[in-house]
Image (cartoon, rainbow, N blue to C red):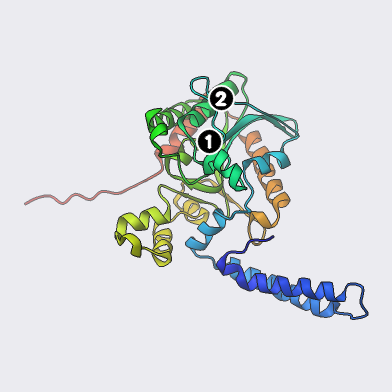
Amino acid sequence: MSYYLEFEKPIQELEIKIEELKKLSNGSELDLSQEIKRLNKKLKELKNDIFSNLTSWQKTQLARHPERPYTLDYISLICEEFVELHGDRRFGDDPAIVAGIGKIEGHSIVIIGHQKGRTIKERIYRNFGQAHPEGYRKALRIMRLAERFSIPVVTMIDTPGAYPGIGAEERGQAEAIATNLMEMSQLKIPIISIVIGEGGSGGALGLSVADRIFMLEYSIYSVISPEGCAAILWKKDSDVGVDDYAKAAEELKLTAEDLEKFGIIDEVIPEPLGGAHRDINETAKRIKSKIIATIKELNSFTAEELLENRYSKFRKIGNFWSSLRRRK
């Protein structure tokens, strides 16, 4: 791993020291095994201490970590086969959303997900995971295809939000997302959504009307980013800073732990110590296991039961109480 977040600096220092001792002892008569063992134990304790006390803002940073696995990374690890499909049959293809048909342990599934891109060139090509209307229309086209052949759909959410540019608005960004919300609520096949990184605003909602919604432990899911929230609420313009972002992140209740408590999501998928990027294979294994178990569960329902349960699930979100005082 080459990139460390600010709160991971103590871990970085200790890992560098351990590597230096390993190089020093390699091919020499010095026996540093006990010291290396002691430092490794200290490193594990340090990681446990740091990652068991993360703030909402620190989890937001982890969700955006540049080395965090993306949709294509997981597809390559969990699918025995995958054929990507392109285009919305109206305007064009949108590389910010990947979609196709794959197989996981003999189960045919459709996988659709945001793709941010890792290098500068790829990030520009993928538009940093911010989809245009044609991306959501492509996703819907392939979901309808899945329904025709009774194939479950798995969506992977990882976007700061739908692209807000002029071209996207001219081509009907809001309409495309709204249509997805309506159509996904009526698809007569199992739908599973997994937030693997950022679940930002309508860009995330456009792929996450599902029978089961899961979040990776250090992912986030919110109507707005902490930065956007801070800028709107406190209106200090250039004075808005990290402390404001941290406060906004806490108030937004955007972590997987928070959203599970509120009943917005169904379950949190634990990540390896330090985050998904620390052990991509183990994270993919956990996601794969959850997908297979959930498909088996959802396949036990009829199409009518799926629709009724999905309707009830979303009707329960946002419970509130009202108290009216009678006027004298």
Residue at 58% in and 29% down:
301
Mark 2 and mark 1: span between their CA atoms? Answer: 26 Å
CB of mark 2 within 8 Å of CB of mark 1?
no
Q: Check residue 11 in the rendering and tell me which mark sits there, or answer none.
A: none
In this rendering, is residue 272 above or below 302?
A: below
Q: Is residue 245 above or below residue 196?
A: below
Question: Mark 2: few, some, or many residues within 10 Å (few <14, many ≥20)?
Answer: some
Task: Tell me, for residue 87, which label it has, or none.
Answer: 2
Question: Is 140 placed left or right of 9 in the picture?
Answer: left
Residue depicted at 41% across the width and 27% down the height: 171
The picture places residue 255, in percent across and down from the top left corner, at 49, 55
Q: Nearer the viewer, residue 117 or 156?
A: 117
Nearer-N-terminus badge (2/1): 2
- Residue receiving disc 1: 211
- Residue 222, x across and y down, in percent: 44, 49
Relative image position of residue 70 (x, y in whole percent)? 62, 45
**As shown in the figure, which amino acid type bears the numbered disc 2?**
Gly
